[in-house]
């Protein structure tokens, strides 16, 4: 029998296997946020699935035998699914209504050829835009870039097994090009546009192509995990961001993953609704505190507001008008809680 520690490790590894992102940050600072429920993702706007729901989901998933079982299980989380994942679930639901005892793998296999063609067109559209922007570069730099986009097109058209086009590989290859000093802004715009290359989280066609060879259990897990709440560093750890709750957002795995290491300003350019979603997130956090949750972290709204404003260059200015505590009151409540906790610990260890 597994103990609670090993179960937690499985849960953490499951999320990191799919997304390569922290389960709750490198310190215990993320745990108070992880315990919250009914919180809006500040990046995608969906109500996130609490991380603690993963264990129950995995347990039920083990007992799913066919398409209808998977659809019934996911149906309980359909309102939480991300946009692309929700469109895939709709396809699964329709397939299961006609083939309840079948396997969802057969569903995606039937769609594969059509979706592959559409995916290629999506990829070409972005590469075409990259080539268009490259006209502003010097001939020398533009040729280096065209060599890479041409190679990508050849890989996409050939579609050879084991030699498929990988978005990440192309993005990394752009780092090999050193633009001239007066071309850096242009080259940054090329990198920004390249981020729009389709992924399984942004494109229904990319999802179907990628997961057509996977098991239906893996497909279901992927749809679920995309909306699972994770800890996000507002200021990335790679850029000196601290492992402190004042630098943490509770964000969906998809929103966390697809920010990559983008500065928040650029992420907002890519997804203009982020300011609106961040306000929804903050309102949910305030409601949680008013309901007696996040005890000892009553100053969190003020800390995260400042961090968001700093990292976004002033573009994220969330309102705390619904919060019943002033900053001074919130800080004092949090400090008093910490002091009482320390005193209790000292007494218990005498």
Image: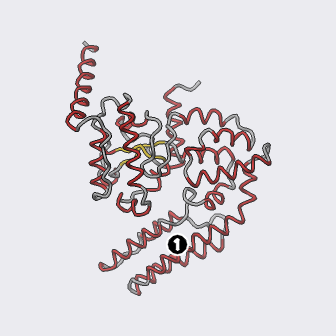
Colour approach in the figure:
secondary structure
Q: Residue at x 63, y 58 (%)?
A: 210
Q: Position of residue 171 (x, y in %)?
A: 47, 67
Q: Is residue 240 shown left or right of residue 119?
A: left
The quarter of the rendered structure image containing the C terminus is top left
Q: Nearer the viewer, residue 250 or 260?
A: 250
- Examine the rendered structure and indicate whether residue 247 appears above or below residue 177: above
Q: Quadrant of residue 22?
A: top left
Q: Is residue 132 shown left or right of residue 116?
A: left
Helix, strand or loop at mark 1: helix
Q: Nearer the viewer, residue 164 or 112?
A: 112
The residue lying furthest to the top in this view is 350
Q: Position of residue 244 (x, y in %)?
A: 31, 41
- Examine the rendered structure and indicate whether residue 35 appears above or below residue 262: above
Question: Which residue position is annotated with label 1?
Answer: 126
Q: Position of residue 25 (x, y in %)?
A: 39, 41
Q: Position of residue 121 (x, y in %)?
A: 61, 72
Q: Residue at x 60, y 51 (%)?
A: 86
Q: Nearer the viewer, residue 317 or 31?
A: 317
- Examine the rendered structure and indicate whether residue 197 appears above or below residue 254: below
Total count of labels:
1
Q: Is residue 184 shown left or right of residue 257?
A: left
Q: Quadrant of residue 134?
A: bottom left
Q: Residue at x 25, y 27 (%)?
A: 338
- Examine the rendered structure and indicate whether residue 126 appears above or below residue 220: below
């Amino acid at each position: 029998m597994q103990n609670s520690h090993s179960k937690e490790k499985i849960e953490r590894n499951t999320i990191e296997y799919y997304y390569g992102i922290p389960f709750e940050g490198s310190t215990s600072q993320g745990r108070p946020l992880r315990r919250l429920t009914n919180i809006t993702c500040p990046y995608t706007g969906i109500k996130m699935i609490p991380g603690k729901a993963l264990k129950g989901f995995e347990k039920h998933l083990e007992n799913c035998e066919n398409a209808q079982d998977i659809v019934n299980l996911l149906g309980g989380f359909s309102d939480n699914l991300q946009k692309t994942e929700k469109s895939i679930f709709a396809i699964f639901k329709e397939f299961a209504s006609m083939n309840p005892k079948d396997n969802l793998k057969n569903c995606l296999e039937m769609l594969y050829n059509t979706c592959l063609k559409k995916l290629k067109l999506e990829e070409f559209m972005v590469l075409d835009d990259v080539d268009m922007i490259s006209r502003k570069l010097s001939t020398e730099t533009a040729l280096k870039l065209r060599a890479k986009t041409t190679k990508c097109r050849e890989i996409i058209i050939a579609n050879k097994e084991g030699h498929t086009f990988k978005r990440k590989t192309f993005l990394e290859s752009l780092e090999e090009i050193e633009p001239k000093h007066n071309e850096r802004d242009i080259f940054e715009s090329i990198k920004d546009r390249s981020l729009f290359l389709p992924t399984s989280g942004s494109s229904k066609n990319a999802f179907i192509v990628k997961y057509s060879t996977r098991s239906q259990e893996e497909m279901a897990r992927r749809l679920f995990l995309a909306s699972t709440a994770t800890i996000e560093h507002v200021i990335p750890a790679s850029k000196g961001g601290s492992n402190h709750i004042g630098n943490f957002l509770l964000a969906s795995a998809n929103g966390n993953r697809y920010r990559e290491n983008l500065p928040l300003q650029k992420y907002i350019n890519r997804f203009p609704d982020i300011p609106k979603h961040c306000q929804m997130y903050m309102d949910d956090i305030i409601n949680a505190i008013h309901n007696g949750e996040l005890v000892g972290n009553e100053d969190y709204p003020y800390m995260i507001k400042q961090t968001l404003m700093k990292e976004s260059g002033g573009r994220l200015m969330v309102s705390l008008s619904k919060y019943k505590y002033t900053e001074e009151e919130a800080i004092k409540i949090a400090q008093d809680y910490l002091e009482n906790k320390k005193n209790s610990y000292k007494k218990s260890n005498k």
